[in-house]
Image: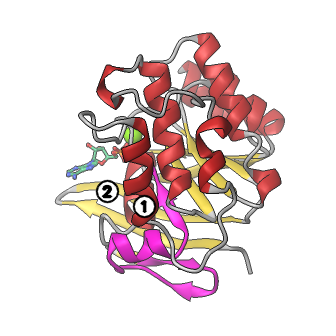
């Protein structure tokens, strides 16, 4: 059994079928990439896994227990922690205060993969404890977002487009941080549009299109897949 198992997951919004029977399994210690065009259901998948939305059908099993329909805070406390497409921090508070608040809302009993006092240096923000979050440049705000997610003591992190809006250098810096997480025993499930980022750091990819899984496997193979190329290039290979 895998740490996270999603089976037969469906989610409809009125007539829109955002997820049309998705099966995904992943283990701690791996980086799984979720890719697919806009509107293919990636964020909805995270919303259902993290408890923000109830599935229409199907289930989510985490560490051997079914969690479908559980409240988001309970799921987060069990070590399944997500980030959002927008940077999530208290803009008016200092970096230090943000980390303190995130730590207080973290998992109970789970060991911390990164000790709280090392969080800021882990994400490259050492020495910036007193800076006001809202006054930091965007790249640093993203690093802070990652520190806050880690402060919640995840065992598996769901990262929704962590590199959106970052330049190439900032994206590389972020990738360098993310690739260290599996070595600490964390699982990472990553949504992104940046194929270079995805292909360079993910051990496995799942490709969604119109709420269905059209391909799955190591990046090299998936990116050569005929259906995937059609979706991304709009032409049959
Ligand atoms: P992605 O993250 O891959 O871009 P989403 O999961 O955000 O895609 O959206 C998948 C589909 O579900 C889209 O057609 C989107 O318009 C629809 N959708 C997502 N969230 C909602 C919602 N809360 N209410 C209605 N429709 C939604
Ligand atoms: Mg999305």
Query: According to the image, label 1 marks what residue?
Result: 20
The quadrant of the picture occupied by the C terminus is top right
Residue at 50 percent across and 60 percent down: it is 152
- Can you see residue 158? yes
Residue at 77 percent across and 43 percent down: it is 180
In screen coordinates, is 179 left or right of 121? Answer: right
Q: Can you tell which quarter of the image residue 38 is in?
A: top left
The quadrant of the picture occupied by the N terminus is bottom right
Residue at 17 percent across and 60 percent down: it is 14
Q: Quote the CA–CA distance across marks 1 and 2.
A: 6 Å
How many C-alpha atoms fall within 10 Å of the one at disc 1: few (<14), some, or many (≥20)?
A: many
Q: Nearer the viewer, residue 29 or 218?
A: 29
Q: Does 53 appear above or below 126? A: below
Is 60 a magenta residue?
Answer: yes
Is 89 a magenta residue?
Answer: no
In screen coordinates, is 151 left or right of 217? Answer: left
Residue at 65 percent across and 64 percent down: it is 112
Q: Does 124 appear above or below 28? A: above
Q: Nearer the viewer, residue 52 or 75?
A: 75
Its colouring scheme is secondary structure
- State the mark number for residue 232: none
Q: Position of residue 52 (x, y in %)?
A: 31, 64
What element does badge 2 sit on? strand
Segment tinted magenta in the rendering? 58-83
Query: According to the image, label 2 marks what residue?
Result: 17
Circles 1 and 2: CB distance less than 8 Å? Answer: yes
In screen coordinates, is 41 left or right of 190? Answer: left
Q: Does 134 appear above or below 43? A: above
């Amino acid at each position: 059994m895998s740490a996270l198992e999603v089976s037969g997951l469906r989610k409809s919004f009125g007539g829109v079928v955002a997820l049309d029977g998705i099966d995904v399994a992943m283990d701690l210690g791996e980086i799984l990439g979720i890719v697919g065009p806009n509107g293919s259901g990636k964020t909805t998948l995270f919303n259902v896994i993290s408890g923000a939305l109830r599935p229409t059908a199907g289930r989510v099993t985490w560490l051997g227990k079914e969690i479908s329909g559980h409240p988001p805070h309970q799921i987060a406390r069990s070590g399944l922690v997500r980030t959002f497409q927008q940077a999530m921090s208290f803009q008016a508070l200092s970096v230090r205060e943000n980390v303190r608040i995130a730590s207080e809302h973290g998992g109970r009993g789970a060991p911390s993969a990164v000790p709280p006092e090392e969080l800021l240096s882990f994400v490259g923000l050492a020495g910036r404890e007193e800076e006001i979050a809202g006054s930091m440049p965007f790249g640093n705000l993203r690093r802070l977002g990652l520190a806050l997610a880690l402060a919640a003591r995840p065992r598996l992190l769901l990262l929704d487009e962590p590199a959106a809006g970052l330049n190439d250098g900032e994206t590389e810096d972020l990738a360098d941080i993310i690739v260290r997480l599996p070595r600490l025993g964390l699982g990472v499930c990553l949504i992104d549009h940046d194929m270079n980022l995805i292909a360079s750091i993910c051990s496995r990819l799942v490709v969604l299109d119109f709420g269905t899984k059209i391909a799955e496997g190591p990046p090299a193979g998936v990116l050569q897949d005929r259906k995937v190329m059609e979706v991304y290039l709009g032409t049959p290979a």
